[in-house]
Image (cartoon, helix red, strand yellow):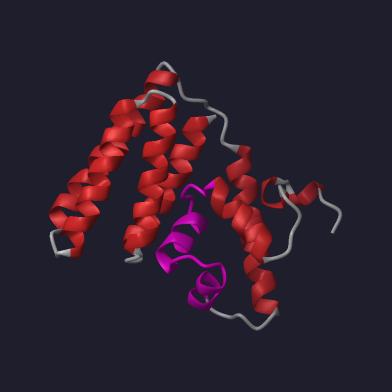
Amino acid sequence: MYFLSIVDDAYALAASVEDGEINEAVFRAARIAAIADEHARLEIADAAFNVIAALDSAANDDTAVLGSALMTLANIISEAIDERNCGVTSPIPNLVQLNRRANLRLILKELTSEDVKGIQAQAKALHIGLRFLEEMLTGGYIPETFAREVEWVMQKPDGWMDEDERERDL
């Protein structure tokens, strides 16, 4: 299960970089390194430490180094997942992701009813960048950490984002 934490943090890392939140990006990269190190995935830990160093370079306007470090980390994580899965991917769509996407749309409707109108204002209310919200709405991965954060912000019970809204008593 530690791979899910690494993937969640990798998505949050990318969103932080995209939004220019360098401190958050360093935090996420450090978490990836710590989790990977704990599970003896040193290639992932090394790549995450390289991202941290590149974030320092990016602060000095050297974004090419950062882009390269992020791509290397993404490729190493992807290879590790493929190795773990023996190259086999499930033909069944991830139902949790489908539920999270449907529930995210419900959250946006709820925000609209509370006069938080427009996707940019809604992204701000959910403490995320606009591009990250748009990506999740259009099929992008919805991290576990984000789902739990939304539940907390919107005062929903733990696990609410993962539930099938059609089976829920509203």
- Residue 64 as seen in the image, left or right of residue 44: left
Numbered marks: total? 0
x 43%, y 66%: residue: 129
Q: Is the magenta stretch mostly helix, strand or loop?
A: helix
Q: Is residue 150 placed above or below 125 in the rendered structure?
A: above
Report the magenta residues as a range.
119-143
136 is within the stretch colored magenta? yes
90 is within the stretch colored magenta? no
- Residue 101 as seen in the image, left or right of residue 71: right
Q: Furthest-bottom residue in view?
A: 115
Q: Looking at the picture, tell me which residue is in the foreground, 131 or 23.
A: 23
x 67%, y 46%: residue: 162
Q: Furthest-top residue in view?
A: 86
Q: Is residue 142 placed above or below 87 in the rendered structure?
A: below
Q: In which quarter of the image is residue 84?
A: top left
In the rendered image, residue 85, in percent from the top left (x then y), is placed at 45, 20
